[in-house]
Image: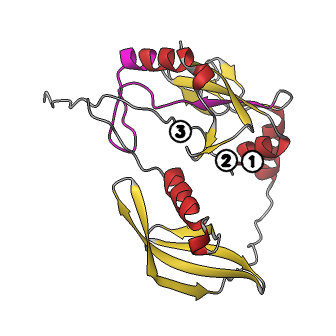
Amino acid sequence: MTIINKMTMNDLYSQLDNKLGSSEYGYASVYDLDTDKSVVYVSVWSDGGREFYSYNYTLNGAKVELDDASRKEVIKTTVYEDKPEEAVTMSKIKSFIKSLLVQKTPNPSLPLMKQFEDEEMVSLEFLYIKPDTFDAHNHTISREDTELMVKSFMDNLPNIKPCFAHKHETDRFSIVKAWVNPHDCTIGETFVPEGQPICQLKWNTVKAWNARKSGVLAGVSIGCKAELEDIEDEA
């Protein structure tokens, strides 16, 4: 059995925050990240107010290291530009009115489910990729293993702890249940194929709920161990 260690963007932020949150770094926190240059910008509160610094960082597998020698103070700047005026046409007005009256779906013949249920603060999320497709790490999963994964997930649901960025346990949301989509449907405006694993989340604070709906909080990222099997190309 091969244990897969993956570094997601959330993992990167979490590891950097954990390192910077120690007294060694003056209890700094990640303010921004430039992944192209491998530079993290951090903010530190001092007697003189808020200060900003940059560090170079390197990745070693699933572990991040900070280059202390690269530390330098920087100035945070913000640039605002006027938004160009957009001509208002009758077709745009009609399109806007229609969007208020009709919920758009990729295929009106498919069953429709709401992704966000405001009154109950409940959202539907993709638990993992659909069978026989590939994730960002070029890993895939069969339909049979998808069923087994979801069954294991539900069997262990009482022991699963909700977290932000895989590391920080939270009570701001709860996992209600998970299932394998039994037929093609539409969630919000997104086509969801048969076999797609889905989970339902209950958000426990209005602030967290609004952050999820606005996209500040992204969808779920499952953290688990798996057996990795090489697939031979039959072509």
Task: Report if residue 142 lies within the magenta region.
Answer: yes
Main secondary structure along the magenta-highlighted residues: loop
Front residue (pair 19, 225):
19
Above or below residue 39? Residue 95 is above
| Between 64 and 148, the one nearer to me in the picture | 64
What's the magenta region?
121-147
Q: Is residue 52 left or right of residue 83?
A: left
Q: Is residue 224 above or below residue 145?
A: below
Kind of residue at disc 2: Leu
The kind of residue on which mark 3 rests is Ser
Report crowding for label 1: few under 14, some 14 to 19, many 20 or more residues within 10 A (C-alpha): few
**Is there CB contact under 8 Å for labels 2 and 1?**
yes
In the rendered picture of this protein, how many numbered marks are placed on residues? 3
Image position of 134 (left or right of 15): left
Local secondary structure at mark 2 = loop
Q: Element at badge 1?
A: helix
Residue 153 lies left or right of residue 67; in this view the side is right
Q: Which residue in the structure is indicated by mark 2? A: 217
Q: CA distance from mark 2 to mark 1?
A: 5 Å
Image height check: is 20 above or below 207? below
Q: Position of residue 217 (x, y in %)?
A: 67, 47
CA separation, marks 2 and 3?
11 Å
Q: Please give the residue where the numbered disc 1 appears in the rendered image.
A: 211
- Give the residue drawn at x 77%, y 44%: 208
